[in-house]
Image (tube, rainbow, N blue to C red):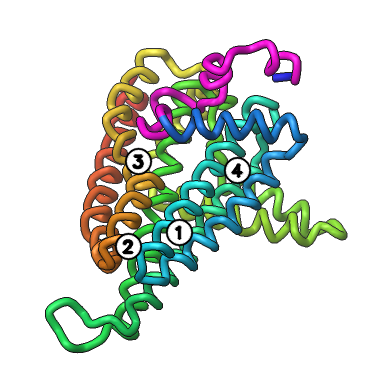
């Protein structure tokens, strides 16, 4: 979309154009984060600021928010909430600006994911340090190293796999809904090819390191979705592309995938931030860590089983048709 097209369209039209899809956007994003994000996107666009610069800005805001959540007083925590909301608006703004100005890129998408990881690393570390000298509820012992272990379990073994698979499922849904060009469904094989090409070139260390990290990210997603990988292979082998897949099969996938989209959204950003805000204000952030480890993991397991079962069923239909 050119500058002229942006200037000639209404705010409502631009908001519609800046969304990925009504089916994969959260209610809070559609009615709050995206409109605010679009306001900032138009402002940054007029100032000539690029989407990746906005993403980098969000990293510093997220780190600042994490630092504020280390403290137990109301003022610091309210300021942390403000900084985190600004980082979240930046998270909306960079993607919306990229879509409106045709500046979407795989690097931008990965930088966006990296920014989210930095935010939550800062927050989890702040919570662990905040709990360190606090007593465990109902006990005289302090959290100490156990608070750090709880934060590590919540972040590395719960949060990280949940968000990566949720993102993958949303991209799969967009793949069936809009086709290859409407999705950001990247593959381990393609990233491995890029890494091998860059290995032979000079002065591309950061590109090479970037693609190695993203290659491993894709590998993790594909390793946990064997049924979808088989379905995807059958579609490509039999029909050549997702666009050539019979409409009845695409609609069947989408019909069964739609009920899972709210679960993918629940396991991403907004619900986590709301619980973090509440538990930090009440000075019981350990409650958030327990919710992450228990409730969120149960949702993750259910979502994963449902999605894999759907892919197995469609694979059998294609095989028998």
> What residue is drawn where x is 60% and y is 34%?
40
* Residue 118 visible in the snapshot: no
Give coordinates of residue 41: x percent, y percent. 62, 32
CB atoms at circles 1 and 2 under 8 Å apart? Answer: yes
Residue annotated with mark 1: 80
Q: Is 151 included in the stretch rendered in magenta?
A: no
> What residue is drawn where x is 60% and y is 58%?
60
Among numbered discs 4 and 2, the one appearing first in the sequence: 4
CB atoms at circles 3 and 4 under 8 Å apart? Answer: no
What is the distance, in whole Å, between disc 1 and disc 2 at their CAs?
A: 10 Å
Per the rendering, the mark at residue 315 is none
Residue annotated with mark 4: 109
Give coordinates of residue 56: x percent, y percent. 65, 52
SS at mark 3?
helix
Residue interval drawn in magenta: 3-31
Among numbered discs 3 and 4, the one appearing first in the sequence: 4
SS at mark 1?
helix
CB atoms at circles 3 and 2 under 8 Å apart? Answer: no
Per the rendering, the mark at residue 280 is 2
Q: Dot 1: within a 10 Å radius of its alpha carbon, few (fewer than 14), some, or many (20 or more) residues?
A: many
Per the rendering, the mark at residue 264 is 3
Q: Quadrant of the N terminus?
A: top right
Q: Foreground residue, 35 or 163?
A: 35
Is most of the magenta stretch helix, strand or loop? Answer: helix
Give coordinates of residue 128: x percent, y percent. 37, 75
Q: Foreground residue, 59 or 187?
A: 59
Q: Is 14 included in the stretch rendered in magenta?
A: yes
What is the distance, in whole Å, between disc 1 and disc 4 at their CAs?
A: 25 Å
Among numbered discs 3 and 2, the one appearing first in the sequence: 3
């Amino acid at each position: 979309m050119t500058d002229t097209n942006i200037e000639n369209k209404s705010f409502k039209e631009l908001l519609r154009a800046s969304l990925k899809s009504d089916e994969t956007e959260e209610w809070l994003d559609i009615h709050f984060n995206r409109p605010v994000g679009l306001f900032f996107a138009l402002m940054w666009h007029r100032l000539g600021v690029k989407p990746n610069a906005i993403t980098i800005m969000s990293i510093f805001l997220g780190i600042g928010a994490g630092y504020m959540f280390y403290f137990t007083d109301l003022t610091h925590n309210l300021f942390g909430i403000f900084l985190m909301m600004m980082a979240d608006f930046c998270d909306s703004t960079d993607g919306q600006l990229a879509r409106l100005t045709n500046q979407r890129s795989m690097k931008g998408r990965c930088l966006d994911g990296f920014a989210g990881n930095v935010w939550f690393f800062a927050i989890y570390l702040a919570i662990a340090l905040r709990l360190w000298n606090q007593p465990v509820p109902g006990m005289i012992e302090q959290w100490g190293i156990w608070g750090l272990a709880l934060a590590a379990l919540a972040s590395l073994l719960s949060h990280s796999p949940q968000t990566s698979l949720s993102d993958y499922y949303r991209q799969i849904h967009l793949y069936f809904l809009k086709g290859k060009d409407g999705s950001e469904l990247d593959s381990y094989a393609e990233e491995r090819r890029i890494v091998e090409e860059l290995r032979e070139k000079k002065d591309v260390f950061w590109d090479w390191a970037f693609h190695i990290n993203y290659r491993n990210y894709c590998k993790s997603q594909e390793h946990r979705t064997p049924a979808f990988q088989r379905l995807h292979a059958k579609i490509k082998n039999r029909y050549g592309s997702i666009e050539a897949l019979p409409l009845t099969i695409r609609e069947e996938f989408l019909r069964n995938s739609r009920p899972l989209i709210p679960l993918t959204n629940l396991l991403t950003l907004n619900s986590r931030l709301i619980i973090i805000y509440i538990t930090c204000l009440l000075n019981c952030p350990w409650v958030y860590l327990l919710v992450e480890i228990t409730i969120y993991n149960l949702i993750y397991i259910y979502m994963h089983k449902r999605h894999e079962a759907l892919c197995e069923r469609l694979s059998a239909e294609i095989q028998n048709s």
